[in-house]
Every structure is written in structure tokens, then in C-alpha cells.
Amino acid sequence: MTLRTRHRFRPRQPLFSSLRRLLAAGMLTLALPVLLAPASLQAQALPNLGGTEGEELSPLMERKLGEQVMNSLRRDRDYVDDAVTLDYLNQFGGNLLSSSPDARGDTAYDFFFFVVRDPSLNAFALPGGFIGVHSGLVLTAQSESELASVLAHEIGHVSQRHIARMIGSQRQDSLLPIAGLVVAALAARSSPDLAAAAMMGGTGLAVQKQLSFGRDAEREADRVGLNLLNGAGFEVNGMVNFFGRLQSAGRTRTDNLPAYLRTHPLTTERIADIEARIRTMNYRQRLDSLDFSLIKARLRVLQDDTVQGWRDASAVFGEQLRQGSRAQLEGARYGLAMIALRQRDAMSARRLLDELYAEAERKPALPTSQVLKSLEIEFLLATAQAERALASVKDARSQFPLSRALAMQYADCLLAAGKIQEATLFLRDQSQLYRQDAGIQRALARAYAEQGKIALQHMSLAENYALTGALPAALEQLRIARSAADASFYDQAVIDARERELQASWREVMKQGKR
């Protein structure tokens, strides 16, 4: 596969498309008081970018800033809110982190890995341990070692606190304007016209430039990344292979450099330094997991989940079936099964799934695929086989007890099988274990709706909106819950207390926006 993916992307709005409206209507409200202020006031309102180690952002404020940025990204349609993809990427990143006790840095970051729909080859680290990867980069990676090299490099930036040092701590209470600018800078990477709206007064441009690290920081991230790759059992030359192909693509492309080279400047000195370090490490060969091929196929479908996108993806999968490797054949069947499900072609989906399972049985030494299991359960639910789906998901969860995707599918299966009370109890337990998971609150709202519990339904929806940063919508859901006929005295007390908390948070948001 070449660096230019053969998938033809349908003309569409760029990455973080909703930021056009957001910047025009709301985000600039947060940023303009800073951007249009006199230079002396700007220095007081924005932290000192590129500060020294003694002026670095505190871990608590760094995490808060990262969460503010993520709240914006999660509401954008280009954020891949797919539990199976998130499961794979976070388990994959978790394996890298577990290879070294120092990988999380002095502040023990709680990392979160995610994907955004964008055909360009890029990845980025946000404050607080949030690491994003463009779908185009995952599709272009020719091995798990190459994908691991990118994630390990970004982990290095976070664990070495490069971002915290760039965003100093003169005014750590001015995080929301900065969060808006960081999101705008990320959007500007793929949308130059958006940069004109977001990067006003030069301050936004400074933030954008700070997202590209200096040479010393890049070399340090390379060093940390190589150690993570080696410790986790990946091929360390995956980093050289990937960076080398990016560099070659930059020389042959006439339009522009690959996005990753623009945000992570790659020099011949860096390549030479990586190669020198690799020579001191033992060579090892690592076979890619089946899930790597399947998740690439899944992302190819999800990155343009439209009728035209399905046609384009089907053409790629058809070519892989004709002349692809065994891994590509498996990925093609998986992707075509996904498309068949979306087209409600149950017969084709069943045939393709059977072929995948037959191939897996011919290689009994390979571990069971969690990604394939999830698609099987999705098929059973789509074809109204709730009891079989429930049995399948129970078996899958016994094999993958930490899977968040399978946990949510278990709740879906319980609801589909009419076990509403059991689903409700399970989701309530999950909401206590994973308090920051908005998807659990959405599912819980659905469970309450099935039981006609209107007040509890809207209280759960309020929590869902609050977790994604949509505070006005959360307050509106609480208002609806309060007026519900089945709202008990206890519910009213909970609503009142939660409303006060959210109103205080919203006032803080508005206060930040006026700074």
C-alpha cells in the first residue's frame, strides 16, 4: 500500500468541520477578549508559551486543559466515537505503556487514545495524556510496529512534559480561551481557511506553532518511543521504516508535505540518531494481530460511513480480495461484512462472517479476535437474534473482561432480550466504575425510557451532556426531569443539587470567556 491511500474520499468538510460554526458563534467569544487585547494585557491573559521547566503547567491544570479540548473534539462529527476502535487503540496503547514503569512520566498520566476522521497522515498529543491519530495514518501503517512507533513517540512528548513546558503557568485559570485556540490550531492543520478565522492577532498562530515541537523535544520523544517499542516487543525499526516512508513521500509530493512532517519536523539528524540507537538493540520480528487488519478495515468504513463511502470502500476491499495478502483478505471480508450489515444484506454479512471464522479455525494457534467477536454480536442484534447475541457476548466477555465495547454490547443485548431491569442494574454499576463515560449514561437513559421512567431518563441524559461539556443542554434535561410526573421527592433533591453544580460550572465557563 502506498502512502497515498487508494480510497477516494468524498468531497466533504475538513477535520473538525463543526468548528466553523463553533468558532463563529461561540469559540471566538472565548478567544477574542485575549486576541484583541493590547499586548500588555495579552501577556497577562495567556500563559507564557515556551516557558522554562519552573514555569510549566501543573499536572492538574494540564489535565483540565486537555479535558476542555476533548469536550470540544468529542462533539465534532469527525471524532470516531466507536467503542470497538477505541477499545483496540487503548488496549494497544496500554500495552506500550505497561512495558516501562516510567512510561507515564512523573505525574502518572492516565492516557487516552482516539481517532479522528481525516485522510492525512498525522497524529498529535494534547495536554494531560490525550493522544489523537488521524484515520489516514492508521490505514497507511503497514504493520502494528509502525503504528506503535507513532503512539510511542507521542507518549514520549506527554511523559516528558513537553506540552506543559510550552504552556507555562502565569495564568492557569485562563484555560478555556487557550483550549479554544488549541482546538482551532488542530483544525487549521487540515483546513487553512479555518486558520484565517481562528488565528487572529498572532496569538492563535503562536499556539499553532507550539503544537509543533522543537528538535530537542522530538529527539527526546524518539528516545522514549524507541525504549517503549523495544520493551513491548515491537520491531524497533518500525519507527525508521515509517519515518523514512514519510520523508520519501515529502520529496515526491508536489502539493505539500505529509501533515505529520509539518507538525513533527523530521531531519536527517533525527533519522541517523534513531538508526544509531536501534543498532544497540536486539532485532526481533513481530507478527501483527488479526485485529490490526480488521480494525483498519473497520476504520476504512467508518471514516466515510455514507452510501458513496461504502461504494469506495467496497472497491478497495474488492481489490484486496483479488490480489491482497492473507491479512488483507481477512480485513476485506470484515469490511465487506460491515458494509453488508449497513445495507441490511444479512445473507452476505453471514457468509462473510462464516468465511472469517473458517479462516480463523485453520489457524488455531492465533488468539480469538475481539474485533471479530464484536461484529458477530452486532450482526446477531441486527438480525433480531437477541438470545443468541446475549449468549455470544457473555462468552466474549469471559475472554475479554476489560473490554468496554463488549460491556456496552452486553447492555444492548440485555435490552434487546427484554431484560430491562438487569440491563439497568448493570449500567448503574458501570456508571459508578466509569464515571467519565458518557456512553454509559446514554445507554442508561435508553433503559429508563424502556421502563417509562421519564425523570430518571432525563437525569441520565443530563449527565451524558455534562460529561461531553454541553452544560446548557444538561441543564435543560434537568429542567425536563424536574417537571416529569414521576419525579420523586428524592429525585427533586438530586436534581436541585446537580443543577446548582452545573450552573456554577457554566458561570465559570462564562467567566473564563470574558477574560
Image (cartoon, rainbow, N blue to C red):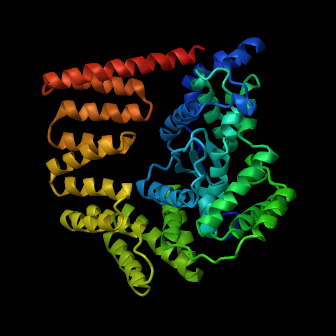
Left or right: residue 76 compared with residue 127: left
Left or right: residue 368 compared with residue 283: left
Q: Residue at x 34, y 68 (%)?
A: 399
* Residue occupying the far bottom of the picture: 362
Residue 324 in view: yes
Q: Of 383 and 168, which appears nearest the observer?
A: 168
Q: Of 282 and 253, which appears nearest the observer?
A: 282
Spot occupied by residue 490 in the image (x, y as percentages of width and height): 16, 24
Quadrant of the image containing the N terminus: bottom right
Numbered label tally: 0
Q: Residue at x 20, y 55 (%)?
A: 414
Q: Residue at x 39, y 76 (%)?
A: 352
Q: Of 446 and 495, which appears nearest the observer?
A: 495
Spot occupied by residue 261 in the image (x, y as percentages of width and height): 76, 52
Spot occupied by residue 267 in the image (x, y as percentages of width and height): 84, 55
Residue 343 in view: no
Quadrant of the image containing the C terminus: top right
Q: Quadrant of the rendered structure where residue 27 is? A: top right
Indicate whether 186 appears above or below 406. Answer: above
Spot occupied by residue 45 in the image (x, y as percentages of width and height): 67, 17
Indicate whether 220 appears above or below 461. Answer: below
Q: Quadrant of the rendered structure where residue 268 is? A: bottom right
Q: Quadrant of the rendered structure where residue 4 is? A: bottom right
Indicate whether 287 appears above or below 217. Answer: below
Indicate whether 159 appears above or below 403. Answer: above
Q: Residue at x 32, y 55 (%)?
A: 407
Q: Of 316 and 185, which appears nearest the observer?
A: 185
